[in-house]
Image: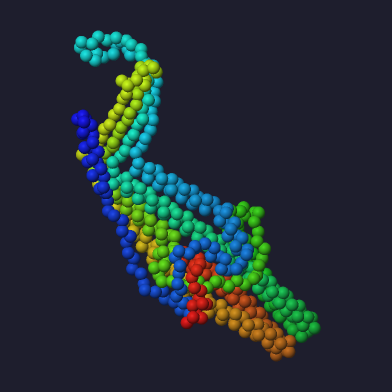
Amino acid sequence: MKAGVKVSVLALAAVALLGACKAGPEYRKPGVDMPVAWKVEAPWREGTPNDGAPKGPWWQGFNDPQLDRLQQMALNGSPTLTIANARLAQARSALAAASATLYPQIGVAARDVRARITQNRPLSGYATPNFSVTQTDMAGQLTASYEADLSGRVQRTIEGARATAEQSAADLENIRLLLTTDLATAYFNLRAVDIELDVLTRAIALQRRSLELANSRHELGAASGLDPAQQQALLDSTLTQVDVLKRQRSQFEHAIATLTGTPAPSFSLAADVKLLVPPAVPIGVPSDVLERRPDVASAERAMAAANAQIGVANAAFYPSIFINGGAGQQGRALSLLFDAPSLIWSLGVSLTAPLFDGGRIRANVENASAGYDAAVGNYRRVVLTAMQEVEDGITGLAALERAHTQAVTATKSANRVLELANDRYEGGVATYLDVITAQQSLLSSERLAAQLSGQRLLTAVFLVKALGGDWAGAKTLTSRSSAQ
């Protein structure tokens, strides 16, 4: 074996032995202090989550075909979702490109050059006279190069790209969840306004009948002009509230149009006063939030990517080794190109290492380490926010359930008071102010009940968002309650 070949083989062996090194710290997910259980109250019970179940069409639990149709429109036509899908495709392409550096890079090169050398070129030797020559240079060569990952830079780069791709996938899931919950929020707000408008419509009809009665009694001399004046003032106030609610409804309708990817001027939803009941959402232990919420997963993968960047920056302290080789044919004419003497080949190892850089590499490592610390802080912030949102949703739904039940009872009582006030006024034993007060009380109670019904739906959506999506396959509160 020739000496040059021996040196190359020894260099390759050294590279193979050193290639197992990896710069930078190994990634360890930082722990977060978790409470033992949520603070729950009736009617909540702890559920049994299924982390492998799909988190998809959670909105179907509300049993509203119109909402189902709008959600499908949003998933198919939302520009925001299109952007997130494109970013995920970019991240996966970047991972594929980074992974390709694990393998040798093989290429082919060819040239056919006709050139003239000047006679007035600098002397190449004292005994060689200058002369001019025109010649042809033909060559075809197969090339190969490979970076020996001595410091683990390539592996850390791939780890970072993989974590970034996983983060983009989690971001896509988070955007899908936010899109569907934002749409449901706008939709339920619109439906709550529809119910309030229906309450006002019925109140206006009642107030107009009362106005007719007050006018009749005034014309007959049984009542003063104050009674119809008071009733007219109440009617005018109620009509004003209708215009305010219609403006709110149009804003929610425009928001739904945008979320579904539809131009607002060409979008409309018919009024619907059907009462909706939020589905029962099982509650798991606090650690389930870490496993289900896509924003928590995204923050965790961001830490992994930041940790890998420390390794990439730290690898700059180590030598970079490249193995290069090639083989082919070269000749001055096509007829000579494939002759045995025209064979050319090369095999070598190149090594570069820093000696002095003014602290640039150290600064890059410190910058990457600070980025990792920031990612850890963001992860803990996201986890704490997730636990806060779930606890808010649990306690909020329980409180709203009780409040709505009480509001329904208060509405029935207010309706009874109005009946009594009307009877007493017609019997001449009460003033019309009692009727006006009873009408206002009934209107307030009915609107409060409608608002609380809408808030229950909105809080249910908020809780689904806090839990990270649908809980398909989990036991419902009803089945849990009946089993206990």
Residue 311 in the image: x percent, y percent?
A: 29, 49
Residue 380 in the image: x percent, y percent?
A: 36, 62
Q: Which residue is painted at 30% across and 34% down in the image?
A: 324
Residue 142 in the image: x percent, y percent?
A: 36, 30
Q: Along the line of sight, which residue is nearer the eye, 420 or 20? A: 20
Tell me if 172 is positioned left or right of 214 in this view: left
Question: In the rendered image, which quarter is residue 407 located in?
Answer: bottom right
Tell me if 399 is positioned left or right of 323 in this view: right
Can you say whether 417 is above or below 331 in the image?
A: below
Can you say whether 262 is above or below 434 in the image?
A: above
Question: In the rendered image, which quarter is residue 190 located in?
Answer: bottom right
Residue 22 in the image: x percent, y percent?
A: 27, 49
Q: Along the line of sight, which residue is nearer the eye, 98 or 299? A: 98
Q: Which residue is painted at 33% across and 60% down in the image?
A: 29
Residue 102 visible in the displayed image = yes
Question: In the rendered image, which quarter is residue 389 located in?
Answer: bottom left
